[in-house]
Image (spheres, grey):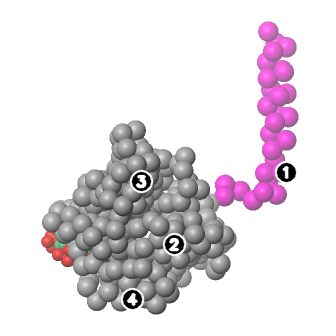
Amino acid sequence: MESPFKETVLKGKTALVTGGGSGIGFAISTELGKHGAAVAIMGRRKTVVQEAAAALQAQGIRAIGVEGDVRNIEDAARVVELTVKQLGRLDILVNGAAGNFLSSAEDLSPNGFRTVLDIDSVGTFTMCNAALQYLKKGGPGKAPSEAGVILNISATLHYTAGWYQIHVSAAKAAVDSITRSLALEWGTDYDIRVNGIAPGPIGDTPGMDKLAPEEIKDDPRFEQPLYRLGEKWDIAMAAVYLASDAGKFVNGATLIVDGGIWLSHPRIAPKEAIRAISRVVEMRSRKTSHASKSKL
Ligand code: COA
């Protein structure tokens, strides 16, 4: 789909996208690049990040792929430094790296729970921590008035509760909390805007393949408009908006991009039934209150 944004909105900026080699992360990397940013893609699998960077280069985007695990503090520092060394600066950090699998709470080991929190929550903070000095105004390659931005990718399942995802719900709740705390502290101290994006179910992603096996995809609710799967492009456009000056007054927000699915629950009754009974119920209650007042 064609972008509604000018292709220069991120001209001169450099982005580092963790988990940027596949799925939603790759779509974000691509769109940030197509809108003018140079892009460093970080991920655990060397061939995946290198191929992803090559795909961006083939579109005329300045890009590098760097192997690294967000759970490793040395990796985080090395990848951030390499990004600045090779691409000259750092303006946009996107924390997209995430771990996930379905498991009932009773089948999940404490180490399984911890592993996902380590990747999603601690990994997000580790990357923010490593990037801070470069995101600040006057950092390498930056003018004294230019501060960077951070985008944390979370989810919506923890707004209520998601079946078989106690680990991910806890991890993403922490990510949203990190977004707000850093928005407060680093927004106030350094003008760094820190926002989040909470994608709903997005089609054609490794996450969806893992979390919604064929049996779940047959769920008839997916035929209702609200249960339509989103596209990776929808999330990437939210990232372009928040990373660009279009979002210059947005700080500490987590933008839900799910078509409203998280609000969805079964109707209590058809609209026609409500039309038929609503005024009757109202009239009945007015009569009752009128009658009790007359007795007084
Ligand atoms: N069900 C239950 N427990 C599981 C599991 C599953 N499907 N997969 C892993 N675990 C548990 C392991 O048993 C282990 O716990 P234990 O030591 O008590 O046995 C713990 O999680 C760590 O597993 P391990 O395979 O050593 O971790 P890893 O670092 O190699 O992999 C994961 C991390 C588990 C998140 C893995 O799924 C992964 O790397 N995924 C790629 C990223 C991804 O999920 N992308 C989709 C994003 S939506």
Query: Disc 4, ligand 1: is the CB inside 8 Å?
Result: no
Q: What stretch is highlighted in magenta?
A: 267-296
Of the numbered discs 4 and 3, the one sitting upstream in the chain is 4
Residue to which mark 2 is pinned: 36
Residue type at tag 4: Ala
66 sits left or right of 60 in the view: left
Is 176 magenta? The answer is no
Name of the residue lying farthest toward the top: 296
Residue type at tag 3: Ala
| Residues at marks 1 and 4, CA–CA distance in whole angstroms | 62 Å
| Residues at marks 4 and 2, CA–CA distance in whole angstroms | 16 Å
Residue to which mark 1 is pinned: 276
- Mark 2 surroundings: few (<14), some (14-19) or many (≥20) residues within 10 A: many
- Mark 1 surroundings: few (<14), some (14-19) or many (≥20) residues within 10 A: few
| Residues at marks 1 and 2, CA–CA distance in whole angstroms | 56 Å
Residue to which mark 4 is pinned: 54
- Mark 4 surroundings: few (<14), some (14-19) or many (≥20) residues within 10 A: some
Q: Nearer the viewer, residue 111 or 246?
A: 246
Counting from the top left corner in percent of width and height, residue 261 is at 57, 63
Residue to which mark 3 is pinned: 143
Between marks 1 and 2 in the image, the one whose residue lies nearer the viewer: 2
Counting from the top left corner in percent of width and height, residue 255 is at 52, 56
Q: Which of 16 and 180 is in front in this view?
A: 16
Of the numbered discs 1 and 3, the one sitting upstream in the chain is 3
Quarter of the image for residue 208 reads bottom left
- Whether tag 4 and tag 3 are in contact, CB under 8 A, the answer is no
Of the numbered discs 1 and 4, the one sitting upstream in the chain is 4
